[in-house]
Image (tube, rainbow, N blue to C red):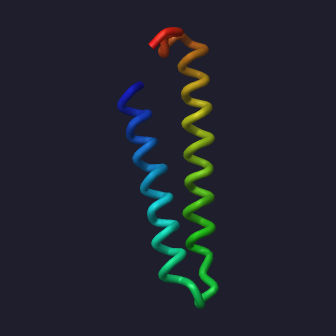
Amino acid sequence: MRIIVIVLLLLILGSLASALLFLFRDRDSGSTRTVKALSLRVGLSIFLFLLLMAGYATGLIPQRL
């Protein structure tokens, strides 16, 4: 479970970094790559939150860490 959380956090940070890169590169072109990267980040964050809640509810994550 810990490895899955770490991988998801790295994916979220990677998506955020790519959105920043797209924001600087696509200033005048009207591209939607920044919006897509940020949407992916939000989706991954929601998935991570639901995964942590499910892990806590099923007992995979103990009450006290």
Image quarter where the N terminus lies is top left
Please tell me whether residue 60 is drawn above or below residue 33 in the rendered image: above
- Lateral position of residue 60 relative to residue 40, left or right: left
User: Which residue is depicted at the point 41% across and 33% down?
Assistant: 4
User: Which residue is depicted at the point 54% across and 75% down?
Assistant: 23
Occupied quadrant, residue 49: top right
Occupied quadrant, residue 27: bottom right
Occupied quadrant, residue 48: top right
Please tell me whether residue 57 is drawn above or below residue 15 in the rendered image: above
Number of numbered discs on residues: 0
Residue lying at the far left of the rendered structure = 3
Q: Nearer the viewer, residue 13 or 44?
A: 13
User: Which residue is depicted at the point 50% across and 79% down?
Assistant: 24
- Image coordinates for residue 33, horizontal then vertical, percent: 56, 73
Q: Nearer the viewer, residue 19 or 36?
A: 19
- Image coordinates for residue 7, horizontal then vertical, percent: 39, 41
Residue lying at the far bottom of the rendered structure = 28
- Image coordinates for residue 6, horizontal then vertical, percent: 39, 37
Image quarter where the C terminus lies is top left
- Image coordinates for residue 28, horizontal then vertical, percent: 59, 90
- Lateral position of residue 22 relative to residue 47, left or right: left
Please tell me whether residue 32 is drawn above or below residue 61 in the rendered image: below
